[in-house]
Amino acid sequence: MYKITFQIEGGNPVVIEANDGDNLLELARRANVAIDAPCSGNGSCGKCRVKILSGEVQSVPSRHISQAEYEEGWRLSCGCKVVGDLEVLVPDIASAYQSRMKTADLSSPEEVALFDAIQKDVCEAGIAFGTNFMALDLTMTEPTLDDTMPDIERLTWAVQEAAQVEEVKIPAQVMIKMASTLRENGFHICAKGQKEGSCFQVLDLCAPEDTRMYAAAIDIGTTTVSAVVADLESGKIVAKGSSGNGQIRFGADVINRIIEQGKPGGKKKLQDAVIKETLVPVLGNLCKSAEISAKSIFQICIAANTTMNHLLVGVDAEPVRMEPYIPSFFSWKGLLARDLKLPANPLAPVIIAPNIGSYVGGDITAGVFASLIWSKPEFSLFIDLGTNGELAFGNQDFLMSCACSAGPAFEGGDISCGMRATDGAIEAAVIDKQTMEPTFSVVGSQEQKPVGLCGSGIIDTISELFRCGIINAKGQFVRDGARVARDKYGMGRYILATAAESATEREISLNEVDIDNFIRAKGAIFSAIETLLNSVDLTTEEIETVYVAGGIGSGINMKNAVNIGMFPDIPLEKFHYIGNSSLTGAYAMALSNQAEEKVEEVAKNMTYMELSTHPGYMDSFVAACFLPHTNRSLFPNSIQEL
């Protein structure tokens, strides 16, 4: 056995034992050391860089590690095998993807205004807020030698009278604490529970002044997790928070995670990563922030894509990725907080927003509900941009949906200097068409040097390169200058920051391979839109409104997205960013029985299109793999300076 020490930059070391030949990335995962590996260890992304401080490893050469870096000890952890004791430096950039990932600031005035506006619109659409949870103030006569009625009958009669029901259910966990709670409070208590028809189920017994009941709404994204806790009676949000999804270290996309969960012990590893490492801390912090007990959360609503739902509950997700792409469930009733060991009342129902297809899940049904396109006569397009691209199109008469395999490019995957939106990521850029000099902004402090490019920064940079005539429609460099360099094979790259100008002392640039990868990703989005529209004999001209949701959507410059052919060329005023609509929809479902019923109805009425088997999709995709498109008439306003 060998001793492997992971020295996390800025953190405490983690020590684990290893056998001869063990893979270094797999060891890090086993030790819960966060190393970003968007490609899940196949060696293609080059993001899992570590530095060997002492000891030796058996490693394979990589195009992502230069000779100078190799001599300094840098390696890709996925390509290293253990051959002895080892001390490994895990750079801060590798672990920051979860702890400091840029997520939506749920407390910002803009996000609060969006959230409030959507709530108002939901109410105006005829959806009333309110649930069947009740907190009953009960006063019972205390038992005496002359009144020997059992506690359970005393409580049952009091609940029947207060809730106006015929049947009362008292679960075992309530029964266990009943005697002590009644006597500690002189038989004056608060009984919290849920009324369904003529039956009331008691979920907890508390002191009479403890009347508050709360609900949690959670959006589980492939990359990020966001949550709110709200008062069940008033709907007031008492705490908000977000975090990176702990599953990220098993791959950037759902396919890699499905493959990982198929390995021995994989389902539990993926489930623990999202529950123990992510949801439990997030909910715990929210309860601490709101100064409430986790046991006072009596309802949880979760909106997530189909794969995330399967991995959350520990169900095999392998059939989701295999033809004919059949998930284990679309909707699942009867799940309780105790089944997932979530920090809440153990009997709290866990509502999962219904999936509608293998790659269109509850996050989209919840988001479509929040967008209200189901209630409007005009044709609307809903686009959720995250690690995956999911779309819906329609109006009050019909709804179509699909998901496109845009890959991890929007999260910086498949891009040589790409990264997620953590501190130091270039998130916006402008290029001077004369000097070709860039001006950019980074996530975090504006004084800090850039580390890499995130999705919105990549869109801006490619759009600017095309606008300035530095690259052509194929993404190839056609202008030279101080910021354009070429390798020995003639492949060009645009340098946003030199080694001296970057925080990592490594050049930050976009090369032709990066641009080609991103063109394919943006082509997947546009061709999905085009295929959806063609299926109902409509064109982009008939789109009245485009709702853009998701974390990446918040930073996108819509004009630049149109300029590169990612979004349809329609008036920019038709585009509206609606924030985390998945979380908004989950919030509405958690606090409104009517909203929950409507989301179920929306899901049942939405037609799911499997693009991978649609006959016209590949032709549309190939045509969209140019800037902005092979058919320039579709993008009359896209500009390229010649």
Image: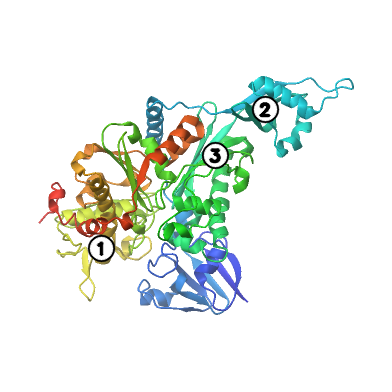
- Label 3: how many Cα within 10 Å (few below 14, some 14–19, many 20+): many
Q: Nearer the viewer, mark 2 or mark 1?
A: 2
Query: How far is mark 2 from mark 3, CA to CA?
Result: 25 Å
Colour mapping: rainbow
Q: Nearer the viewer, mark 2 or mark 3?
A: 2
Residue 575 left/right relative to 284: left
Type of amino acid at the residue the image marks with label 2: Glu
Mark 2: secondary structure: strand
Q: Quadrant of the N terminus?
A: bottom right
Q: Residue at x 56, y 66 (%)?
A: 264
Query: How far is mark 3 from mark 1, CA to CA?
Result: 42 Å
Q: Residue at x 19, y 64 (%)?
A: 476
Type of amino acid at the residue the image marks with label 1: Asp
- The residue singled out by tag 3 in the image is 300
Is residue 592 in view from this perspective?
no
- Label 1: how many Cα within 10 Å (few below 14, some 14–19, many 20+): some
Q: In the depicted view, which residue is nearer to us: 268 or 22?
A: 268
Query: How far is mark 2 from mark 1, CA to CA?
Result: 65 Å
Residue 516 tag number: 1
Image quadrant in which you'd find residue 273: bottom right
Residue 142: percent from left, percent from top: 81, 22
Q: Quadrant of the C terminus?
A: bottom left
Image quadrant in which you'd find residue 108: top left
Residue 391 left/right relative to 262: left
- The residue singled out by tag 2 in the image is 167
Type of amino acid at the residue the image marks with label 3: Ile
Mark 3: secondary structure: strand
Residue 60: percent from left, percent from top: 43, 78
Mark 1: secondary structure: helix
Residue 440: percent from left, percent from top: 28, 52
